[in-house]
Amino acid sequence: NAGVTQTPKFQVLKTGQSMTLQCAQDMNHEYMSWYRQDPGMGLRLIHYSVGAGITDQGEVPNGYNVSRSTTEDFPLRLLSAAPSQTSVYFCASNTGSGANVLTFGAGSRLTVL
Amino acid sequence: GQQLNQSPQSMFIQEGEDVSMNCTSSSIFNTWLWYKQDPGEGPVLLIALYKAGELTSNGRLTAQFGITRKDSFLNISASIPSDVGIYFCAGFYTGANSKLTFGKGITLSVRP
């Protein structure tokens, strides 16, 4: 039982490049989400999904796309990276049963030059 | 939207000391959570609170769900060096499209 697995751990991009941050969970959780963490800003919700085929926007969705084709996977796509997207990204999941106790991945540190 | 206030942004204590952190909100919640983030890792749940007035312990950590449902506190007793990290509070109110709201976190440093 690996929990929530994020890849890559580190990534450097040039402005305008695209990339996908991968997130997978093996706990059969319905709810998955992506957060970004910036100094002094805490954790801000980017996108979330309450189940396969369903996604919705969080607090800071601009510049990011998501899809949820399976229960296990919830990739985050940056179509045209900008320096403002330099951040640490966390994927999280929970059962969606109302417990609202998120299990986080170890994070992906992205630098956009 | 809902906001959680955690202050100060940083705390510095001596090993062995107790430390208390507060989290306040302008809105009521029916779940309060406390997370800790170690350097280079994702946040990990420390304590979950589901009832106003609830007091819950996890080892040297004790957290309380405020009676007004607008606040919570976390107390760490007899701090040790591995207590360093960022402590986040989070609140949730059950309802349509409800989402977990996080505070900005408090960075705790423990001097040996």
Image: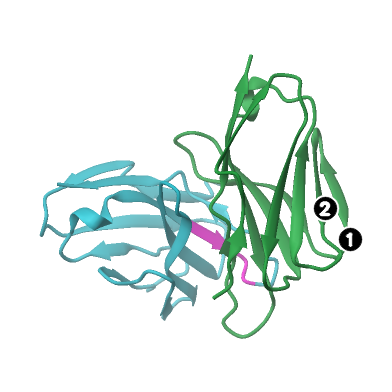
Chain colours: A cyan, B green
On-image quarter of the N terminus of chain B: bottom right
| Foreground of the two, A56 or B22 | B22
Q: Looking at the picture, how far across and down is residue A3, in whole percent?
A: 54, 49
Q: Is residue B101 above or below residue A38?
A: below
What residue does disc 2 label? B64
Please tell me how crowded label 1 is: few (under 14), some (14-19), or many (20+) other residues with Cα within 10 Å: some
Q: What residue range appears in magenta?
A: A92-96
Q: State the image quarter where residue A58 is shown.
A: bottom left
Mark 1 lies on residue: B53
Circle 2 Cα neighbour tier, 10 Å, few/some/many (<14 / 14–19 / ≥20): many
Dot 1 and dot 2 residues touching (CB under 8 Å): yes
Q: Position of residue A88 (x, y in %)?
A: 37, 48
Q: Residue at x 69, y 60 (%)?
A: B24
Q: Is residue B71 magenta?
A: no
- Left or right: A78 as drawn, with respect to B41: left
Q: Amino acid at mark 2?
A: Gln
Position of residue A97 measured from the top left corner of the image (x, y, whole percent): 67, 72
